[in-house]
Amino acid sequence: MTLPRSKYVHDGQEGVYHCFNRCVRRAFLCGFDPSTHRDFSHRKQWLVDRLKFLSSVFSIDVCAYSVMDNHYHTILRTRPDLLSSLPDRDIALRWLTLFPRKRILNQPPLPPSEKDISALSAQPHRVALLRLRLSNLSWFMGQLNVFISRLANKEDKVKGRFWESRFKSQSLLDDAAIASCMAYVDLNPVRAGLASSPDDSNFSSIQERFRAWHAQSFTPPHNLHNLNSQPPSTISLTPPNQTPLSSVPPIPAPTPIDSFLPSPIPPSWLCPIHSDSHRRGILQLSETEYLTLLHHSARLLRSNVPSPVHPDILPIILRLRANPDAWIDTVSHFGSNFHLAAGLLPSMRRFALLLRRHWLKGLLTARIAFAP
């Protein structure tokens, strides 16, 4: 029995959701199609670019994503609280950026004019409605899916449905569910055999995070004497006597002028793992802890042999209130083990009561996967 999304996704309330969709056609969404011998890999960048654009317009954080050959996953956090203090003019500007009034054939849309912004901001009832839409999960996913389907249909010179149905969503009720689902999404390419390690997973959020971490961890020559004062976890993710994370190309040595000033690191468009002075993070973990967790989890996935988790990530898993013995199974089958929601057993029971249900798929899995 299906359930309307409005029953558990409410306007004006913050929430974290795992959203995914699958292509309906025989042709692959983004990969190489063996039946037609056509390569659609360039469409993966369409999805990433569209996610990046929508995250700059909507008050919705993109916490994780992975683009596969015939489907994609993303984890989104709605932030209606950020829009409550914005003036009406900013709301009008965001909406007109998303739906421009003026277009030129075969050219990018023109930026909104001051006349259009003033006319829209002078309608308080309309602005109040747009304020809700700019933090609405369905509006975000609609603008993502419609955009991709129109581009793909135009490229294939066909009409009709591109996605098999409306997007699916799962409510992530607590940190244990959020961390497990993020690991499930980020490790999707490794689990499918498309990548050997998380930092080799193209078109995924974990690859972006690894690259940003390497850029931030690079220390110019004039700061090398500070390495002795840093904790080991901030210097390297690789434990002793183990292989490195990946064959990341070495960063070229700076010129004498650059050695005085380190290169600025552009802020990432993804939601940070840990809160900083600019944005609220998604987990009570540091960036290094999360990357360490993903690195060792990927090794266990690739081994295909039941083995205990690495001692370096055991405290992290326990802090997340997850069961170490069931961790790999949880991050391998998260999407199929849970349906409408995921979380600790008390969180799942409260969610079921809100829906006026006595039973919910995933209750037994929650009892096994997460600590009481």
Image (cartoon, rainbow, N blue to C red):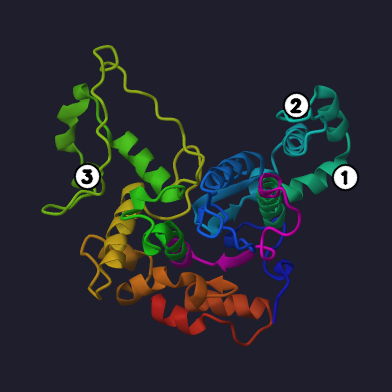
The residue that disc 2 covers is 110
Q: Amino acid at mark 1?
A: His
Q: Position of residue 14 (x, y in %)?
A: 62, 56
Q: In the image, 269: left or right of 12?
A: left
* Position of 151 relative to 295 (above/below): above
* Residue range (magenta): 152-179
Q: Residue furthest front?
A: 36
**Residue depth check, mark 2 versus mark 1: number of the one nearer the observer:** 2
Q: Marks 3 and 2: in contact by CB < 8 Å?
A: no
- In three-dimensional space, the C-alpha distance between marks 2 and 1, rounded to whole angstroms, equals 26 Å
For residue 269, say whether it is visible.
Answer: yes
Q: Residue furthest top?
A: 257
Dot placed on the residue nearer the N-terminal end, 1 or 3: 1
The residue that disc 3 covers is 236
Residue 125's label in the rendered image is 1
The residue under the point 67% across, 56% down is 137
Q: In the image, 261: left or right of 229?
A: right
For residue 286, say whether it is visible.
Answer: no
Q: Is residue 163 magenta?
A: yes
Secondary structure category for the residue under label 1: helix
Q: Amino acid at mark 2?
A: Leu
- In three-dimensional space, the C-alpha distance between marks 1 and 3, rounded to whole angstroms, equals 53 Å
Query: Within the image, what quadrant is residue 294 found in?
Result: bottom left
* Position of 220 relative to 302 (above/below): above
Q: Amino acid at mark 3?
A: Ser
Dot placed on the residue nearer the N-terminal end, 2 or 1: 2
Secondary structure category for the residue under label 3: loop
**Residue depth check, mark 2 versus mark 3: number of the one nearer the observer:** 2
Secondary structure category for the residue under label 2: loop
